[in-house]
Amino acid sequence: MFTRTTDRTLFTRGTAMFVSALTAGAIFTASTGAQAAEATPRTTAPVSTGISAPVSTGITTPVSTSITAPASAVATSDDDADDAQWEALLNSMLSVPEDVLAQGDEATAAYLKQQQNRKPGQPLVGFGWPSFGCMGAVAVAIGTNLLPAAKMVKIVRVAKRVGVKRIVSAIKAIRKGKGHTLANDLQWVGAQLLGLEGVKAACH
């Protein structure tokens, strides 16, 4: 009887220890699995923002590089060219000696034509580089009585006294309606020269 009771007690204790061991193993396994799950990095799917990067088409808009000169610059250039022609005309007249002018139209025209036969670039003493085309135009004007030698000598004398540039300024003043502000001799010379626009066109 005592032996049977002892065996039953031992069996009960063994069973309890076995169950306890199983329970402890299950807890350990669950704990280890949880830790492994936390250690594994989470993979998150990319979220679309709805913003697309621009796509290059390889087409470049051309940039205009043309430069337009202002109207004031163009006007100034035209004025300078006009002034140069008037100066060339006056210098062509000044190139004729007064003693030649005193001999009349034929002598003056012959002198100018003779000067046209000079070598290009050969200067006239006291008058720089002559305009040979201008000389020819003046000779024609003398021959057609548009610019007789008697009138030309008066223009030359005023030009020698006041200077070529001052006469050119007088022409500008007359064109602007301010001729009345000029001295009588400048008014007269300016008016005579304005009647020679066609002759001036040959002067460069």
Image (cartoon, helix red, strand yellow):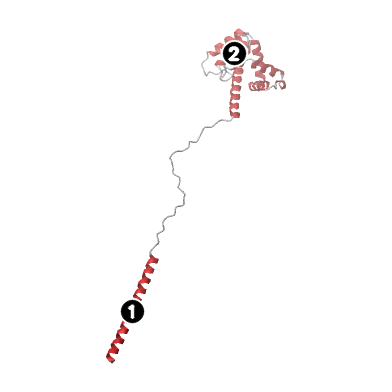
Disc 1 crowd rating (10 Å Cα; few below 14, some 14-19, many 20+) is few
Residue 178 placement, left or right of 41: right
Quarter assignment of residue 132: top right
Distance of label 1 from label 2 (alpha carbons): 140 Å
Image quadrant holding the C terminus, namely: top right
Image quadrant holding the N terminus, namely: bottom left
The label nearer to you, 1 versus 2, is: 1
- 121 vs 106: above or below: below
Residue 111 placement, left or right of 55: right
Residue 147: give x, y in percent of width and height: 63, 11
Closer to the camera in the image, 46 or 167: 46
Say what secondary structure mark 2 lies in.
Answer: helix
Which amino acid type is shown beneath numbered disc 1? Val
Residue 198: give x, y in percent of width and height: 60, 15
Residue 107 placement, left or right of 62: right
As drawn, which residue projects farthest toward the bottom? 2
Residue 110: give x, y in percent of width and height: 57, 9
Closer to the camera in the image, 104 or 173: 173
Residue plotted at (38% across, 66% down): 37
Quarter assignment of residue 90: top right
Disc 2 crowd rating (10 Å Cα; few below 14, some 14-19, many 20+) is many
Say what secondary structure mark 1 lies in.
Answer: helix
Give the total of numbered labels.
2
Nearer the N terminus, badge 1 or badge 2?
Answer: 1
Residue 161: give x, y in percent of width and height: 67, 19
Which amino acid type is shown beneath numbered disc 2? Val
- 200 vs 72: above or below: above
Residue plotted at (31% across, 79% down): 18
Closer to the camera in the image, 182 or 55: 55
Q: Name the residue under label 1.
A: 19
Q: Mark 2 points at which residue?
A: 138
